[in-house]
């Protein structure tokens, strides 16, 4: 039996391009399932008004983040957008899985890949995407959603470039793909996935 098979917890990795609705779906899951909490990843971006230190993220200075890198305390890390670093704390993941906890994480493709490889039996990858049979069609939908929420044009172009090269092609590697055409339906579909996976592991409450 491998080390990952001895762990009792479960992590749902919510993956997908910016504008797909991952965060809204994740919040709905946390509100519904009493034993599902967000996995606090490390970041150097500023904390938002509705966030709490250690709940959504570990909000760190660049120096603090660099220290974690130097001490090998992150499973994976990267500069997702210029000046904004994100990483997955090794101890946070290990503690949750050892304790039999259930966590949901809104993480990028590279982070999800490393997490799934490190804990193959304890990570379920759910890809959230937008309508469109072709990548070009999905990019057009993403652009419109970002413009509708008044993202900066420079951010939009950076996120679309990342979606095209990294994020959209990754959906074929995930356990599930949820198309967020209408948010309530996407939440319902993801809820059913979570219930199924929790029940299969005896973690449904």
Image (cartoon, rainbow, N blue to C red):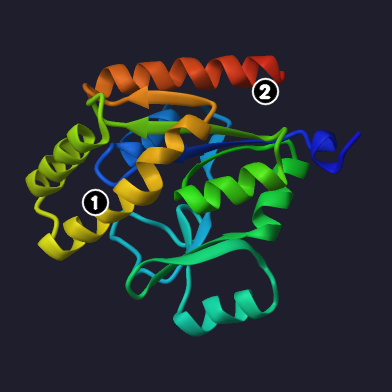
Relative to residue 113, is residue 181 drawn left or right?
left
Relative to residue 205, is residue 4 drawn left or right?
right
How many other residues sit within 10 Å of disc 1, few (<14), some (14-19) or many (≥20)?
Answer: many
Relative to residue 93, is residue 174 drawn left or right?
left
Q: Residue at x 62, y 47 (%)?
A: 115
Tag 2, which secondary structure?
loop
Q: Position of residue 25 (x, y in %)?
A: 35, 32
Whether residue 161 is visible, yes or no, is yes
Q: Nearer the viewer, residue 195 or 53?
A: 195
Query: Which residue is identified by label 2?
Result: 203
Q: Position of residue 107 (x, y in %)?
A: 46, 49
Relative to residue 5, is residue 65 drawn left or right?
left
Which of the numbered marks, if any, corresponds to residue 103? none
Q: Residue furthest right?
A: 1
Q: Position of residue 162 (x, y in %)?
A: 32, 54
Quarter of the figure with residue 128 = top left
How many other residues sit within 10 Å of disc 2, few (<14), some (14-19) or many (≥20)?
Answer: some
For the C terminus, the quadrant is: top right
Q: Residue at x 16, y 36 (%)?
A: 141
Measured in 3D between alpha carbons, the distance from the residue under mark 2 to the one under mark 1, in whole angstroms, is 37 Å
Could you tell me how many numbered marks the image carries?
Answer: 2
Q: Nearer the viewer, residue 56 or 138?
A: 138
Which of the numbered marks, if any, corresponds to residue 160? 1
Whether residue 205 is visible, yes or no, is no
Quarter of the figure with residue 116 = top right
Q: Nearer the viewer, residue 28 or 68?
A: 68
Q: Residue furthest bottom?
A: 63
Relative to 163, residue 191 above or below: above
Relative to 179, residue 27 above or below: below
């Amino acid at each position: 039996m491998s080390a990952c098979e001895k762990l009792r917890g479960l992590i749902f990795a919510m993956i997908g391009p910016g504008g797909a609705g991952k965060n809204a779906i994740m919040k709905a899951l946390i509100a519904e399932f009493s034993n599902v909490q967000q996995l606090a990843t490390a970041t150097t971006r500023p904390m938002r008004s509705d966030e709490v230190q250690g709940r959504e993220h570990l909000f760190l200075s660049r120096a603090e983040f660099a220290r974690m890198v130097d001490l090998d305390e992150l499973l994976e890390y990267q500069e997702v957008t210029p000046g904004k670093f994100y990483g997955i704390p090794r101890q946070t993941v290990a503690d949750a899985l050892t304790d039999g906890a259930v966590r949901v994480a809104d993480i990028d493709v590279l982070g999800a890949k490393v997490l799934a490889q490190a804990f193959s039996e304890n990570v379920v990858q759910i890809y959230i995407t937008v309508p469109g049979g072709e990548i070009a069609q999905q990019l057009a939908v993403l652009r419109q959603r970002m413009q509708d929420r008044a993202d900066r044009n420079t951010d939009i172009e950076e996120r679309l470039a990342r979606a095209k090269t990294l994020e959209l092609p990754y959906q074929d590697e995930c356990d599930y793909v949820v198309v967020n055409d209408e948010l309530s339906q996407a939440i319902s579909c993801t809820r059913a996935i979570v219930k199924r996976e929790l029940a299969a592991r005896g973690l449904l409450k």
